[in-house]
Amino acid sequence: MQAGFLYALGAYAIWGLFPIYFKWLQAVPPLQVISHRVIWSFAILIGIIAGTRQWSQLKAALSLRAAKPYFLASVVLSVNWLIYIWAVNAGFIVETSLGYFINPLVSMLLGRIFLGERLRPLQLVPVVLASTGVLYVTWAYGSLPWIALSLAGTFGCYGLIKKMATLGSLHGMTMETGFVLVPALVYLAFTEWNGTAMFFHTGAVTTVLMVGAGLVTIVPLLMFASAASRISLTMNGMLQYIAPTLQFLIGVFVYHEPFSRDLLIGFSLVWIALAFFTAEGLYTHRKRYKVTG
């Protein structure tokens, strides 16, 4: 369990520090960052498969039926990445954190709608609280917090698709990045042709960071996959708030994004909802453990 805890802690900490990494790439257009993220992620995954001699498992998984959910997952994940990187570099780190704070509740609702998962009566309380918080933020902003809702919605849909998929994390992620590999290569070739490419044209540091985008994508995913089999869903659910908390703190205290009293009220409602959601989950888990134990 200790190893699983450390893997999960590492994964969520890396995700929480993403704003700093992608701020270093602020001069690079988001679509170029995404393209390099896809290409180098795919290269690393193929390298892992080759190194562990898992070609036969990947080949066996390459069927039209198995590929469909991963194609959808690749589209949804690419949209999520694009919105996130644009938002970070446009000065909306705080709003991105809100998206990942409400993501567990969005996932719960998607499970209810598409998988028929039943909500316990007390689980409706955090849904109402979080919805009230989002509505209050909408009122405070004067517009819908579309970045937060888009990130929560796309990542929630990604989780839903992955839940219905059949492959392990390594082969699944390889297929997902593989589906968008060719469009990424074509787009980067086009930027090279029209003179807008940044790779190898803006200094060694930026070039290394673009290559590193693949590494910082794959490492936490593999750590998360290793943790998932070693720790309980309850612990994993509690640790997942590390990432948006770090992102929020970075947005406010490192990049000094505005955080008004109205936003504090809206965020507080979401935080209370998450605390209630977590407490209800822990109580239910312990109650079931006592009955079965």
Image (cartoon, rainbow, N blue to C red):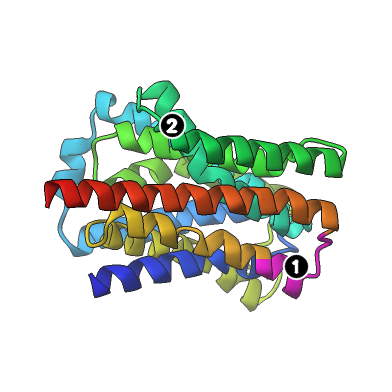
Quadrant housing residue 178? top left
268 sits left or right of 104 in the view: right
Boundaries of the magenta span = 249-259
Point out residue 63 in the picture as x, y percentages from the top left corner. Answer: 23, 29
Kindly identify which residue carries mark 1.
252
Q: Residues within 10 Å of mark 2 (few under 14, many from 20)?
A: few
In the image shown, does 115 or 269 lie closer to the viewer? Answer: 269
Q: Residue at x 45, y 52 (%)?
A: 278
**Image quarter hosting the N terminus:** bottom left
> What residue type is disc 2 on?
Pro
Q: Residue at x 35, y 38 (%)?
A: 162
User: Can I make out residue 154 in this image?
Assistant: no
Q: Residue at x 48, y 47 (%)?
A: 277
Kindly identify which residue carries mark 2.
121
Point out residue 288 in the picture as x, y percentages from the top left corner. Answer: 22, 46
Q: CA distance from mark 1 to mark 2?
A: 35 Å
88 sits left or right of 71 in the view: right
Placement of 212 over or under 195, stated as above or below = below
Q: Secondary structure at mark 1?
A: helix
Magenta includes 29?
no
> What residue type is disc 1 on?
Val
288 sits left or right of 188 in the view: left
Point out residue 259 in the picture as x, y percentages from the top left corner. Answer: 81, 60
Q: Secondary structure at mark 2?
A: helix
Placement of 68 over or under 187, stated as above or below = above
Residues marked 1 and 2 touching at CB (< 8 Å): no
Magenta includes 255?
yes
Point out residue 8 in the picture as x, y percentages from the top left corner. Answer: 36, 65
